[in-house]
Image (cartoon, rainbow, N blue to C red):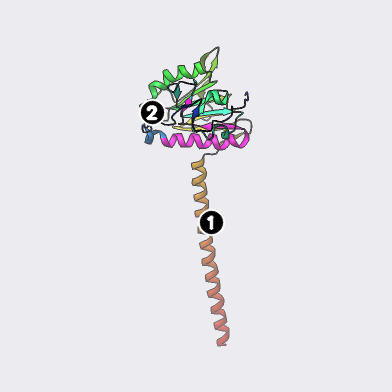
Amino acid sequence: MTTSKPLPLSTERNVFNGIYYPDEDGLPLPDGYDQEPHFMRVMTMMRGYLERYYEVIVSGNTFLYYEEGNRRAVVSPDCYVTFGLPRSAILPHNSYFTWHLGRVPDFVMEIGSESTARADLGRKRDLYASLGITEYWRYDPTPDSRHYGEPLVGERLEDEEYVRIDVRPGPDGMIRGRSSALGLDLCWDEGQLRLYDPVRDIWVPDYFELRDAQAEAEARLAKERAARQAAEARMAEMEAELRRLRDQT
């Protein structure tokens, strides 16, 4: 993983050499309700875990500009990761400018949807290769892989062309492949993307799983507390009854 220092920030948001680069196109997110839950899972897992151990930018659904002076030279990956730079490097701008940061992302992932699948398989794939993005992954959450024809595909850049990363079912039945860029295994588990750290031998926590586990733990503690309070109340009643009986004798 190479590191570089970003150029000095412009004094204006998304402005370089007097040119303003928009950070949105005024259009709604394509297939938002279909993609959103999967996007949120991927982003929270990757950002929460990678930022714990590395200086890294983990972002997605933001504009990535790759040619200074050309406002049309822009793409919006669903998820991208750049090592060796802090998230503060992209602030106060709301987009990723390759000439400002001095490099392209190390990893890009697209999440399959009805309106974006064709571009993900063609135009975007060619663009990412031409930009020199080391790894390009495509994740299809549908049970029949109707968007990409495959549930999970990883490709690594070699001699300016993408070649397949070995992705296959593991002993546990999950489809999985190793991302050298992330140092993680990417696993397709009945439509959900899971991440495994082979060095630390742990599954990357899923925010929603953690949230549900916390809710279950809180409900269990509340039930135990109610039971304890009921037992204490019953004990107090028994002690009061014993005192009453003693007073009568």
**Does the magenta portion include 199?**
no
Picture coordinates of residue 24 (x, y %)? 41, 31
Q: Residue flagged by tag 1: what amino acid is it?
A: Leu
What main secondary structure does the magenta stretch of the protein show?
helix
Residue, far bottom: 249
Picture coordinates of residue 35 (x, y %)? 40, 33
Work out whether mark 2 precedes mark 1 in sequence or the reverse, and give the earlier one: 2
Give the position of the N terminus as an image quadrant. Answer: top right
Residue, far top: 159
Q: Where residue 221 is drawn, which disc sits there?
A: 1
The residue lying toward the viewer, choosing from 54 and 204, is 54
Q: How far, Cα to Cα, is label 2 from label 1?
A: 41 Å
Q: Residue flagged by tag 2: what amino acid is it?
A: Ser
Q: Where residue 113 is drawn, which disc sits there?
A: 2
Query: Which residue is drawn at the image coordinates 55% and 87% (left, top)?
Result: 248
The residue carrying pointer 1 sits among few (fewer than 14), some (14 to 19) or many (20 or more) residues within 10 Å by Cα, namely few
| Residue 173 at least partly seen | no
Range drawn in magenta: 36-64
Query: Which residue is drawn at the image coordinates 52% and 15% (left, top)?
Result: 163
Picture coordinates of residue 223 (x, y %)? 50, 58
| Residue 82 at least partly seen | yes
- Residue 228, quarter of picture: bottom right
Dot 1 falls on a residue whose secondary structure is helix
Q: Where residue 76 is drawn, which disc sits there?
A: none
The residue lying toward the viewer, choosing from 62 and 234, is 62
